[in-house]
């Protein structure tokens, strides 16, 4: 599980540290360290996992509702309907 960062000659150390930090976050190593910092009972892990799943389901449900509302607005505002609505007020 070796992580490598390619450092170019003359590259600033701040940039190298930033690359390292991004790699650590991307790999999830920091979260793993935080989780293993203290012992967590298996029942607590299950409860936290169940609660996280419930939060994710709620987020997904809200996302689906927003998407349905957008689809409905787009359906109602279709180009052919816009043309029909604009022609209603005219007298020929």
Image (cartoon, rainbow, N blue to C red):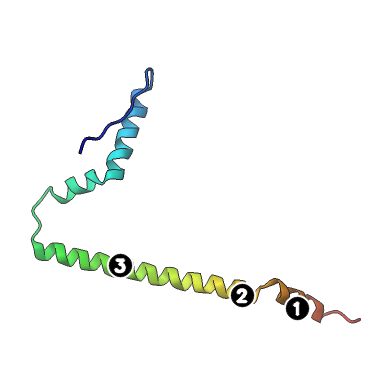
Return the residue at label 1.
85
81 vs 51, nearest the viewer: 81
Q: Is residue 43 left or right of residue 62?
A: left
Front position among marks 3 and 2 = 2
Q: Which is more N-terminal, label 2 or label 1?
A: 2
Cα separation between marks 3 and 2: 30 Å
Distance Cα–Cα, label 3 vs label 1? 42 Å
Q: Is residue 5 above or below residue 45?
A: above
Q: Residue at point 49% right, 70% down? A: 67
Q: Using a 10 Å C-alpha cutoff, classify the residue at mark 1 as few (fewer than 14 neighbours), some (14 to 19) or many (20 or more).
A: few
Disc 1 to disc 2, C-alpha distance: 14 Å
* Above or below for 60 versus 3: below
Sequence-wise, the earlier of marks 3 and 1 is 3
Image side of residue 4 versus residue 32, left or right:
right
Residue at position x 81%, y 78% in the image: 87
Drawn side of residue 24 relative to residue 70, left or right: left
Which residue is pictured at 30% across the width and 30% down the height?
A: 5
Q: Which residue is mark 3?
A: 55
Instruction: Determine whether label 1 and label 2 are within 8 Å by CB.
Output: no
Which badge, 3 or 2, is on the more N-terminal residue?
A: 3
Does dot 2 land on a helix, a strand or a loop? helix
Residue 74 picture location, percent across and down: 61, 71
Q: Does dot 1 land on a helix, a strand or a loop?
A: helix
Q: Residue at x 34, y 33 (%)?
A: 18
Counting from the top left corner in percent of width and height, residue 13 is at 33, 24
Under tag 3, what secondary structure? Answer: helix
From the image, tell me which residue sits under label 2: 75
- Name which quarter of the figure residue 16 lies in: top left
Q: Residue 58 location in percent, x, y?
A: 35, 70
Locate residue 48: give its quadrant: bottom left
Total labels: the figure holds 3
Side of 47 where 16 appears, left or right: right
């Amino acid at each position: 599980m070796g992580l490598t960062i390619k450092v170019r000659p003359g590259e600033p150390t701040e940039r190298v540290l930033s690359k390292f930090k991004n790699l650590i976050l991307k790999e999830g190593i920091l979260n793993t360290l935080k989780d293993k910092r203290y012992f967590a009972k298996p029942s607590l892990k299950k409860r936290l996992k169940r609660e996280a799943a419930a939060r994710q389901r709620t987020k997904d449900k809200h996302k689906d509702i927003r998407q349905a509302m957008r689809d409905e607005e787009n359906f109602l505002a279709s180009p052919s309907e816009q043309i029909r609505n604009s022609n209603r007020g005219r007298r020929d």
